[in-house]
Amino acid sequence: MVRVAEWLSVAAMELSSTLFPHYCLVCGERLSADRLMICPACLDLLARYPGSEALYDAEKRIEGHAPFTEYRSDLGFSHHNPVRDLIHTIKYEGHPELGERLGRLFAPEHLRAGHFADIGVAVPVPLTPRRLRRRGYNQSAYIARGLTGVLGIRLDETLLARRDSTGTQTHRGREARWASMREAFYVPDPDKVSRRRILIIDDVLTTGATLSACALALMEAGAESVSYYTLACGERTI
Ligand SMILES: [Zn+2]
C-alpha cells in the first residue's frame, strides 16, 4: 500500500509538471517538479556575481549625498552578466514574484550575519503613480516582502511617496538631475518616520541618486538613521 501511495504521489507530481511545466526564468530550461523558478545551474551562476565589489564603487557614488548607516547588495550587475537578465525579468516581464523569492533566498545569510539588526521599519522605493499604473506592480516591494519576512522587519509601503516627474531629465546636468530626483520623493506622514531607524529597499543601485533622494526625504522628516538594501548593485553608468 505504501509503495502504491508513493507511486501515486510521484505520478501526480509528474503529471502536474507535464500539464503545467515550469521553466527557469533565467535560462529558460525546463524545471523538475520540485523547482519553482530558477534552476540549480543558474543559482550557482548567480553566486559568482556577488555584489560586494560593485558596492565598493557605489560607496563613492553616494558619498556626500546621503549618510547611510548600513548598505548591502547581494548581486553584481553589469550589462554583460546574467544578473541583468534576471532584473529585467523581475522588472519588465511580469515576474515580481521572482524578486520576492530572491529576497527570501538571500535573507537567511543576512540574518546569520546580524545585518540590519537594529532596523525598526523598512520601505521599498516607490514608483511614480504613473509608472505603477503602467507596470501594475512595484518590483522593489516584492523584494522587500521576501527579505523583511525572513528578517522579521516590519514593512510599511506608505512611508515614502513619489511624484510623477515633470519634464525630461535627459539633457540636464548631473547636479540638476540629483536635485530633481530629490524633489520627487516625499514623506506623507512624518510621524511614521520620526526617530525611526529605516531600511530602504530597491532592486538595483546604479547612480545612487534614487536611494540618496529617498534617504534625504526620510532624514528631513526626522528619521534617526537610514540604511539600504538592493538586490543588485550596478557598475557605474554615468
Ligand atoms: Zn536556469
Image (cartoon, rainbow, N blue to C red):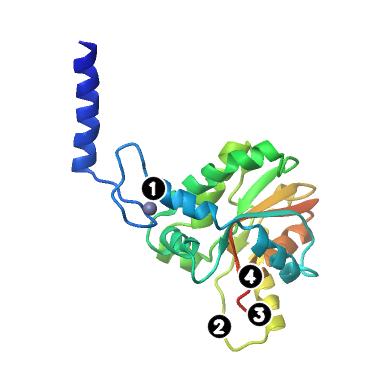
Q: Is mark 1 within 8 Å of ligand 1?
A: yes
Closer to the chain start, of discs 3 and 4, is 3
Q: Secondary structure at mark 3?
A: helix
| Residue 186 visible in the shown view | no
Closer to the chain start, of discs 4 and 2, is 2
| Residue that carries the numbered disc 3 in the rendered image | 177
Residue under the point 49% across and 65% down: 81
Residue 195 appears at what percent x and percent y? 80, 47
Question: Which amino acid, by three-letter code, is at mark 1?
Answer: Cys
Answer few, some or many: residues within 10 Å of disc 2's Cα (few below 14, many 20 plus, some between 14 and 19): few
Quick check: 34 above or below 174? Answer: above
Residue under the point 50% across and 50% down: 142
Q: Quadrant of the N terminus?
A: top left
Q: Secondary structure at mark 2?
A: loop
* Nearer to the camera, 65 or 51: 51
Q: Quadrant of the C terminus?
A: bottom right
Asked whether the residues under the numbered discs 3 and 4 touch, taking CB atoms below 8 Å apart as contact, a structural biologist would say no
Question: Which amino acid, by three-letter code, is at mark 2?
Answer: Gly
| Residue that carries the numbered disc 2 in the rendered image | 167
Left or right, 46 with reference to 237: left
| Residue that carries the numbered disc 4 in the rendered image | 184
Q: CA distance from mark 4 to mark 1?
A: 39 Å
Q: Nearer the viewer, mark 2 or mark 1?
A: 1
Q: CA distance from mark 4 to mark 2?
A: 12 Å
| Residue that carries the numbered disc 1 in the rendered image | 39
Q: CA distance from mark 3 to mark 2?
A: 11 Å
- Extreme residue in the top direction: 1
Asked whether the residues under the numbered discs 4 and 2 touch, taking CB atoms below 8 Å apart as contact, a structural biologist would say no
Residue under the point 60% across and 56% down: 50
Q: Secondary structure at mark 1?
A: loop
Question: Which amino acid, by three-letter code, is at mark 3?
Answer: Arg
Question: Which amino acid, by three-letter code, is at mark 4?
Answer: Ala
